[in-house]
Image (cartoon, helix red, strand yellow):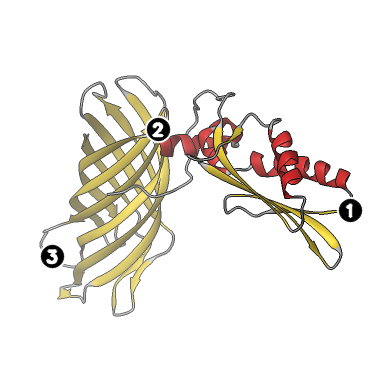
């Protein structure tokens, strides 16, 4: 299972690399004989930006500078890779030098290659998210759980299992889970049984300790699950109810034995649907059906 791309975030960052340098190829075009002089001006301005170094090959980023005339007016366009270009109108040779300097400041500061290398240039959320994507550690977990929820007429119970994927660094974890559960319980008069549940959920968790062998965590996310209810209305078997629930997820628990090649996860997870459970083909269920999971997972 591959993790979602998310821009989800970590809270602790690696140190800023002040000397980070991005190798960059330079392309200069001019619609007159000024191309050589334009290249010299660009190189002089680039000398003020130690974050990028002009190379002939092996470039990680590309900078394009173009000077052209349209209907008697001259324009300077500067662009890094496939980002939105910066364009200025210029009237004199002095304007060209000034506008090159301004354009390079804007373009190089937002060069995505540079930002991905020097994470300190991002804001706190994007910086931590990039750190999670680049440096996070993957874990897979097999979970067993018991489910208890509300069914309107009676409490509903089921047993199930999940396969979970986690990626984390420092205090932050992102997770995605595939779950299945059900109950083989026989039907009784005027009762409801959760015969099957299948679905997925994903979210973000915060661990109180980034390094300890045991840590408490809490977090949340969203889930989408199919539920099938069976039951009796009085003494008569009712048509089963099928519903697809989109819900908010709240999860908490304790992870321990984290110093080894596996870990244990004792957890509780609440699902709070955004709407009532109902099926137009039956009157068996027409109520709000939140449910809670409690279980134990093994990560590896």
- The residue singled out by tag 1 in the image is 91
Q: Residue 285 versus residue 109: which sits nearer the camera?
A: 109
The answer to which of marks 3 and 2 sits earlier in the sequence is 2
Question: Are dots 3 and 2 in contact, CB under 8 Å?
Answer: no
Write the residue at 26% across / 50% down.
148
Foreground residue among 17 and 91: 91
Looking at the picture, tell me which residue is in the foreground, 68 or 220: 68
> Which is more N-terminal, label 1 or label 3?
1
Q: Nearer the viewer, mark 3 or mark 2?
A: 2
Disc 1 element = loop
Provide the secondary structure element on which disc 3 rests.
loop
Residue placed under numbered mark 3 in the picture? 187
From this viewpoint, is residue 127 visible?
Answer: yes
Q: Quadrant of the C terminus?
A: top left
Q: Is residue 282 left or right of residue 45?
A: left
Which residue is at 45% across, 48% downward? 6
Q: Secondary structure at mark 2?
A: helix
Other-residue count near label 1 (Cα within 10 Å), few / some / many at <14 / 14–19 / ≥20: few
Query: Which residue does the image show at 55% across and 25% down from the upper left?
Result: 17
- At x 21%, y 37%, the residue is 296
Going by the picture, which residue comes out furthest to the front?
Answer: 33
The image's mark for residue 277 is none
Q: Relative to residue 150, is residue 252 depicted above or below? A: above
Which residue bears the numbered disc 2? 135
């Amino acid at each position: 299972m591959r993790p979602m791309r998310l821009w989800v975030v970590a809270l602790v960052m690696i140190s800023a690399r002040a000397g980070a340098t991005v190798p960059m190829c330079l392309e200069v075009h001019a619609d007159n004989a000024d191309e050589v002089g334009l290249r010299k001006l660009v190189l002089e301005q680039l000398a003020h930006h130690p974050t990028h170094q002009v190379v002939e090959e092996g470039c990680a980023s590309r900078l394009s500078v173009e000077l052209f005339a349209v209907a008697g007016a001259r324009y300077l366009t500067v662009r890094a890779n496939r980002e939105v270009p910066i364009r200025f109108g210029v009237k004199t040779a002095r304007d060209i030098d000034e506008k090159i300097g301004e354009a390079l400041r804007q373009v190089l500061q937002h060069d995505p290659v540079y930002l991905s290398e020097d994470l300190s240039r991002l804001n706190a959320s994007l910086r931590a998210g990039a750190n999670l994507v680049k440096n996070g550690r993957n874990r897979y977990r097999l979970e067993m759980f018991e489910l208890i929820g509300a069914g309107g007429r009676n409490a509903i119970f089921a047993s199930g299992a999940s396969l979970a994927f986690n990626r984390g660094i420092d205090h932050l974890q992102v997770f995605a889970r595939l779950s299945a559960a059900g109950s083989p319980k026989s039907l009784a008069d005027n009762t409801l049984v959760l015969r099957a549940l299948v679905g997925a959920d994903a979210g973000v968790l915060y661990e109180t300790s980034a390094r300890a062998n045991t840590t408490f965590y809490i977090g949340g996310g969203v889930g989408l699950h199919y539920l099938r209810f069976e039951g009796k209305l009085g003494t008569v078997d009712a048509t089963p109810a099928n519903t697809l629930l989109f819900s908010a997820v709240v999860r908490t628990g304790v992870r321990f034995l984290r110093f080894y090649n596996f870990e244990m996860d004792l957890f509780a997870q609440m699902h709070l649907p955004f709407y009532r459970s109902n099926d137009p083909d039956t009157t068996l269920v027409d109520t709000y059906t939140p449910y809670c999971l409690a279980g134990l997972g093994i990560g590896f």
